[in-house]
Image (spheres, helix red, strand yellow):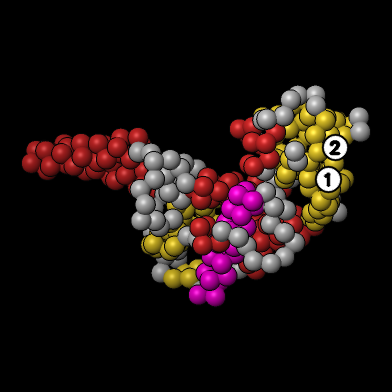
């Protein structure tokens, strides 16, 4: 279960117990007061422990509301199945894209088994599901899937943002296949006339039906074209940890991102030196705005 969901639940329990303590004081029930004070102390300790807990594995809660949902009693199986499948496919593709630097125009998704989530529970409130990364190993650092999942949550939120610039900035970091999965998710949600609440480790986002319809229109109106080229560039700057670079391409300043492997190779290159790289040149186009070109280095040659 996402830590934020557990923390929110504990805070609600604390508020309820505090109300019971006030009632006990009001009616002079000292026995009840003592019991509730013990309960309050226990809950406050749990809250502190959970707040300080270092979570390593991926976890998310997806809450649905709308025509396909009957309060907290049930949800249409077809709608739930399509929504969860769209969400999982989006996670699989973003994970593979981050690990390999590219997806390819078609074919199977690599490392798919490593990025699968499992339904581990039904969330309380409006109908929802808890999805977790299940592993027999004890991790000491955040898993790649946890980092990916948090980025997917942000991507979904950014796509439905009222600020067009946030959406544009976010989709610069994905490819056409990820965009297609993102579009499929919002089509499913929009057809179901639903709302979505996503709760992650630290953040949560609420997408109403208007935001979901906006996200659907945006993704349907956007296209990402990619061309792969080998280029000789002059490296003038790089940030290895964030996988970013700046370079001159025939005297023209370009900037963009790199794959993890390319970032490591670039660290061994001297600044202002000419290097040969394999680069994906991405053009993001939409009927609503001007085209934008994005660069990504996937390989650095000797």
Whether residue 302 is visible, yes or no, is yes
Residue that carries the numbered disc 2 in the rendered image: 232
The picture quadrant where one finds residue 30 is: top left
Q: In this view, which residue lies farthest toward the front?
A: 302
Q: Is residue 67 left or right of residue 163?
A: left
Residue toward you, 12 or 261:
261
Question: Residue 263: which numbered mark, if any?
Answer: none
**Label 2 packing within 10 angstroms: few (<14), some (14-19), many (20+):** some
Quarter of the picture holding the C terminus: top right
Residue that carries the numbered disc 1 in the rendered image: 230
Q: Residue at x 72, y 53 (%)?
A: 175
Q: Is residue 103 left or right of residue 142?
A: right
Whether residue 68 is visible, yes or no, is no
Residue toward you, 275 or 94:
275
Whether residue 73 appears in magenta in the rendering, the answer is: no
- State how far apart marks 1 and 2 are (Cα): 7 Å
Q: Residue at x 75, y 61 (%)?
A: 105
Residue 31 percent across, percent down from the top left? 8, 41
């Amino acid at each position: 279960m996402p830590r934020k969901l557990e923390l929110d639940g504990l805070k609600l329990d604390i508020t309820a117990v505090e109300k019971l303590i006030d009632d006990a004081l009001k009616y002079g029930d000292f026995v009840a007061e003592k019991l509730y004070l013990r309960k309050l102390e226990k809950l406050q300790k749990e809250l502190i422990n959970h707040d300080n807990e270092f979570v390593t594995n991926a976890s998310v809660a997806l809450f649905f509301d709308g025509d396909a949902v009957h309060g907290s009693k049930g949800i249409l199986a077809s709608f739930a199945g399509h929504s969860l499948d769209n969400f999982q496919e989006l996670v699989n593709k973003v994970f593979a894209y981050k690990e390999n630097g590219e997806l390819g125009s078609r074919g199977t998704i690599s490392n798919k088994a490593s990025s699968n989530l499992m339904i581990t529970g039904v969330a309380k409130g409006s109908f929802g599901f808890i999805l977790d990364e299940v592993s027999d190993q004890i991790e000491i650092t955040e898993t790649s899937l946890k980092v990916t999942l948090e980025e997917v949550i942000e991507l979904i939120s950014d796509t439905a943002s009222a600020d067009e610039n946030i959406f544009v900035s976010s989709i610069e970091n994905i490819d056409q296949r990820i965009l297609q999965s993102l579009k499929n998710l919002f089509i499913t949600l929009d057809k179901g006339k639903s709302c979505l609440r996503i709760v992650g480790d630290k953040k949560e986002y609420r997408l109403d039906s208007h935001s979901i319809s906006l996200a659907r229109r945006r993704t349907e109106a956007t296209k990402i074209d990619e061309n792969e080229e080998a280029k000789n560039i002059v490296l003038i700057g790089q940030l290895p940890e964030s996988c970013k670079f700046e370079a001159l391409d025939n005297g023209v300043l370009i900037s963009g991102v790199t794959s993890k492997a390319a970032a490591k190779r670039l660290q061994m290159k001297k600044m202002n030196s000419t290097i040969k790289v394999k680069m994906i040149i991405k053009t993001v186009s939409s009927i609503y705005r001007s085209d934008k070109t994005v660069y990504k280095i996937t390989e650095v040659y000797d």
